[in-house]
Image: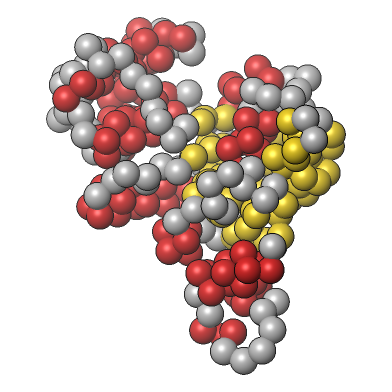
Amino acid sequence: MAPVIETEGLTKRYGRQAAVDQLTFEVQEGEIFGFLGPNGAGKTTTLLMLLGLTEPSAGRARVLGFDPVREPLKVKRQVGYLPENVGFYEDLTARENLTYVSRLNGLSEAEGQERIDQALKIVGLAEEGVKLVGAYSRGMRQRLGIAELLIKEPRLVFLDEPTLGLDPDGINRMLDLIVSLSRERGISILLSSHLLHQVQRICDRVGIMIKGHLVARGTIEELRQLMPGEGKAGASLEDIYMRYFQEA
């Protein structure tokens, strides 16, 4: 089975500065892949290249078998993207916002409303759909962002810091929702975050980005085995990450 994401030597330079440098990795179908690194590590730039929203300086990428540079519309039809700050029309209700999205995706009125009903139910906002988005909390907005992604029935979604700014209850609800998208709906997920314990909790594999370089990738157990010395059997993702961060 072909990976849903493949990159080889993917690079993005701004002048002499490489935001992403020689990035090579893959994401398998159905997995939650954690893209881990501090702010400024190149995670968001990578997502934008994979979506065809910015052109790489070198290297190549394939997303669901398509080239994001040459076939960006084919990528966008099957990929959902939840940015760090989700934008909605605040003077419209959640349902009205999603209706607008369904029309943009070319859905008929009947099919659009059916998908909206299902999406709001999945994200736990079925009773809140008639509220103005301006009255929504950040956690509700993030879940509405997931509902927006579900309208197009994507095969793959990119989530950029989806729990940032949420309270503990909101974080737990969002993480549970992400897992359900993968396990119950078969959606492949690339999760970009700098919150290590959350990545360790839900991700099948992890890639660690530091200063534009992918310095390690694998399951938590595989990354533990790469650590030198004693005590690695019980090492957390934070222990693993700090080793690479200190060496960078």
- Residue at horizontal 39 percent and vertical 28 percent from the top: 86
> How many numbered discs, if any?
0
Q: Nearer the viewer, residue 160 or 243?
A: 243
The extreme front residue here reads 16
Foreground pick, 246 / 203: 246
| Residue 152: image location, x then y, percent | 48, 23
The colour scheme used to paint the residues is secondary structure
Residue 200 visible in the displayed image: yes
Left/right of residue 122 with respect to residue 239 in the rendered view: left
- Above or below residue 109? Residue 46 is below
Q: Position of residue 43 (x, y in %)?
A: 60, 43
Residue ID at (25%, 16%): 90
Where is residue 138, by image quadrant? top left
Residue 115 appears at what percent x and percent y?
36, 23
Residue 45, picture quadrant: top right
- Where's the C terminus, which quadrant? bottom right
Q: Nearer the viewer, residue 228 or 6?
A: 228
* Above or below for 215 versus 75: below
Residue drawn at x 58%, y 67% as measured from the top left: 241
Q: Residue at x 75, y 38 (%)?
A: 17
Q: Is residue 66 visible?
A: no
* Residue 136: quadrant of the picture: top left
Measuring from the top left, give residue 240's x and y in whole percent: 58, 72
For the view shown, which residue lies furthest in the bottom direction?
230
Left or right: 89 in relation to 137 = right
**Position of 135 compared to 54: left or right?**
left
